[in-house]
Amino acid sequence: MAKKTKKIETPIDQRETFVSIQKSFADSDLSVEEKLKTLYALQQADTEIDKILQLRGELPLEVEALENEIADLKAKSAGVAEQIEGLNAKISEAKHNIVECEAQLEKYRSQLDNVSNSREYDSLNKEIENQDLLKAIAEKNIDEAKKAILAKKADMEAIKEKVEVRTGDLKAKTTELSTIVESTAAEEERLRAKREACAEKIDARTMSAYDRIRKSCNNHLAVVSVFNGDSCGGCFNSIPPQRLIDIASNKKMIICEYCGRILVNPDFD
């Protein structure tokens, strides 16, 4: 009994085009004609999905950008609030230092009345000068911290106003996007189901080439029908007569020699 030879499948090369898989295209459970029709139906579904996505335009990106901006502003506001908290702590510490300085000043001044020599008198006066200096530094720190707090609060208010404006913009953009999505949801679901059904019939190598060519083209067309009787529907270059005959026969994959797209029978429309 003869053993069945197992077909060895080579790994998919992401650089493959329809030209490179042209010879093996017919090696499938589907007929070439059915496979071409399936590919064209897939392309039509993707084109209609592209139109729906174009309706949304830049809205999804704008919504995401606004969400990120609002999050950054809130994080910045939280950072400013933390700085204000630090300044308030600095004020509390400086006030505590002032109280300690005043207590020391009171003690040293009371000791001046009981000094026994000039050396002790000079030493106490030096301590009084030091405490006066420390008190002045603490008072200066409090004044600077209070001014900084006022500036930080102004920054927070500006951030708050900006957040309110951006939140309003986000609400409007989100509403607009939701309206478009809701109005096209049923049609998009139908088209994606159609796309999935077509993709399931096509081998992985052909799908890989299809997706790659779609991404590389500005109009996202990888499979096109003959345009105006004798031209490629993708790049609009003329197709030789013999190739037109081959396309009409639906018996082989025909590739545009200029743009590399699959050309299919206009009767498929």
Image (cartoon, helix red, strand yellow):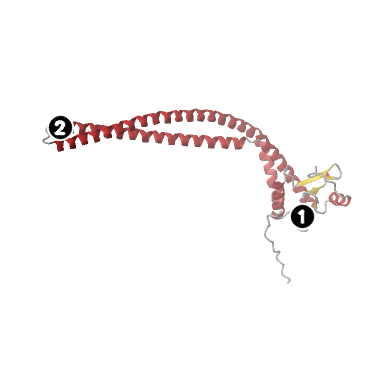
Q: Nearer the viewer, mark 1 or mark 2?
A: 2
Q: Which mark is residue 19?
A: 1
Q: Is residue 133 visible?
A: yes
Find residue 249 and report its horizontal and vertical position in percent: 85, 51
Name the spot of residue 181 as percent of width and height, x first. Answer: 63, 34
Front residue of 169/227: it is 169
Instruction: Please report the residue visible at 13 percent of the width from the left and 31 percent of the height from the top.
Output: 113
Q: Quadrant of residue 176?
A: top right
Classed neighbour count for the residue bearing mark 1: other residues with Cα under 10 Å, few (<14), some (14–19), many (≥20): some
The location of residue 55, given as percent across then percent down, is 67, 34
Q: Out of 97 and 27, give the one closest to the viewer.
A: 97
The front one of 91 and 121 is 121
Q: Nearer the viewer, residue 46 or 239?
A: 239
Query: If you read the primary sequence from the N terminus, does the residue marked by circle 1 or circle 2 appear first?
Result: 1
Q: Residue shown at 63%/33% (left/top)?
A: 182
The residue type indicated by label 2 comes to: Leu
Q: Is residue 122 left or right of residue 34?
A: left
Between the C-alphas of marks 1 and 2, the distance is 105 Å
The N terminus appears in which quarter of the rendering?
Answer: bottom right
User: Does the image show residue 100?
Assistant: no
45 above or below 144? below
Residue plotted at (30% across, 35% down) = 93
The quadrant the C terminus occupies is: top right
Mark 2 element type: helix
Q: Could you tell me the amino acid type at mark 1?
A: Val
Horizontal side of residue 79 vs 130, given as left or right: right
Quadrant position of residue 64: top right
User: Quadrant of the rendered structure where residue 7 is?
Assistant: bottom right
Where is mark 2, residue-wise? Answer: 112
Give coordinates of residue 142: x percent, y percent.
Answer: 33, 31
Residue 226 is tagged as none
